[in-house]
Image: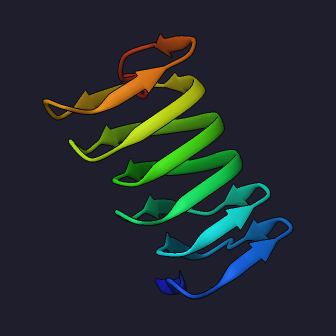
Amino acid sequence: MVNSVIEKDVTVEGNITSSKGSVEVRGRVVGDVSALAVTVLEGGTVDGALSAKSVTVEGAYSGKIQCEDLRLAASSQVQADVSAQTMSTENGAQLQGNIKVSGKSNGA
């Protein structure tokens, strides 16, 4: 799996797509991010839609999240409309928006 990293000193204005890997955001992205896995690390910010199998937010995020598995760390600050199959939040995570957690599909 390919791992792409947006470093702390980088700002990307535009959409990011990774069809075969993950995207880690340590800096700032203004645009949509689509990948197998997306991680917004502490200190990182994303303003746009996130679409991935797995999404982890440790930093700041604003937009719309569509994923299978969402994890919000204690340091996360999220303003989003969320659609996920599963979601876990650590004590201290901040989340504001509409949330729809559908539960895992059994693949039948």
Image check: 24 left or right of 42?
right
Residue drawn at point x = 38 percent, y = 51 percent? 56
Relative image position of residue 41 (x, y in whole percent): 38, 65
Relative image position of residue 88 (x, y in whole percent): 25, 31
Relative image position of residue 71 (x, y in whole percent): 31, 41
Q: Quadrant of residue 6?
A: bottom right
Q: Residue furthest right?
A: 14
Q: Nearer the viewer, residue 34 or 32?
A: 32
| Rendering colour mode | rainbow
Q: Is residue 103 shown to the viewer in this render?
A: yes
- 3 to 37, vertically: above or below: below
Relative image position of residue 55 (x, y in whole percent): 44, 49
Residue drawn at point x = 41 percent, y = 24 percent? 95
Q: Quadrant of residue 97?
A: top right
Image check: 69 left or right of 8?
left
Q: Is residue 108 shown to the viewer in this render?
A: no
